[in-house]
Image (cartoon, grey):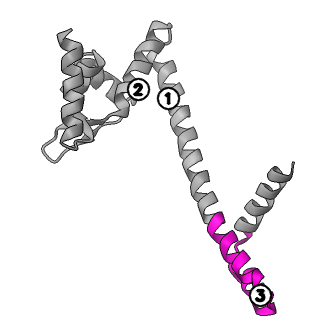
Amino acid sequence: MYNSFHNHNVIVWRFYIGAEKLKIGELAEIANVTKRTIDHYTNLGLLKVERSSSNYRYYDYSAIERLRFIEQCKKDGMSLEEIRKMILEEDAEEVDILELRLKIKGLEKDVSEILAHLEKNDLKNYEYVKKNVSHESLSLIHALLLLINN
């Protein structure tokens, strides 16, 4: 009872003061693992850590869920190496998705500019579009149109 109540208080207190990171001891207590376990997982690349100028280790709140995931995978019989590979694949997919979102944002901007120039129905505007839209943008717009129309 104390542990669960204390964990809740740590989270509420950290949220109240605006702290976005957890010290290793706080993370260990909340996730119900040892600091040594967190160190081991960090050394294996399973957890991401930030160090302060005074060399304190700080973990993002997402580390709580990551620790729960790791512990569940271990209970399911997976090795730490298998878990590490799975996490690396997930992280790579997240990066790909972020890159794709950034490209889509850029395309939205390009399309808005194109439409603004084309609405003027002027030959100069067509030339502007031809000069200022990259081949990559045109290819991506074309691919998106194909996806939308299918």
Residues at marks 3 and 1 touching, judged by CB atoms closer than 8 Å: no
Residue 34 lies left or right of residue 116; in this view the side is left
Q: Nearer the viewer, residue 36 or 122?
A: 122
Q: Amino acid at mark 2?
A: Arg
Contact, CB < 8 Å: mark 1 with mark 2? Answer: yes
Which residue does the numbered mark 1 point to in the structure image?
A: 87
Q: Nearer the viewer, residue 30 or 96?
A: 30
Q: Earlier in the sequence, mark 1 or mark 2?
A: 2
Q: Quadrant of residue 62?
A: top left
Residue 79's place in the image compared with 98, above or below, is above
Q: Earlier in the sequence, mark 3 or mark 1?
A: 1
Residue to which mark 2 is pinned: 66
Judged from the image, the secondary structure of the residue bearing numbered disc 1 is helix
* Residue 127: assigned label: 3
Rendered residue at 18%/33% (across/down): 13
Q: Point out the frontmost of discs 1 and 2.
A: 2
x and y percent of residue 120 in the render? 75, 87
Q: Which residues are the magenta region?
A: 107-135
Identity of the residue drawn at 25% across and 26% down: 27
The image quadrant of residue 72 is: top left
Kind of element beneath mark 2: helix
**Residue 142 place in picture, x, y as percent:** 80, 61
Q: From this view, report whether residue 133 is shown above or below residue 148.
A: below
> Amino acid type of disc 3?
Glu
Residue 14: x percent and y percent? Answer: 20, 36
- In this picture, is 14 found above or below 8? below
User: Which residue is situated farthest in the left direction here?
Assistant: 54
Crowding near the residue tagged with mark 1, few <14, some 14–19, many ≥20 C-alpha atoms within 10 Å = some
Instruction: Determine the image quadrant of residue 57.
Output: top left
The residue located at (55%, 49%) in the rendering is: 98
- Mark 3 vs mark 1: give the one in front: 3
Q: Label for residue 148?
A: none
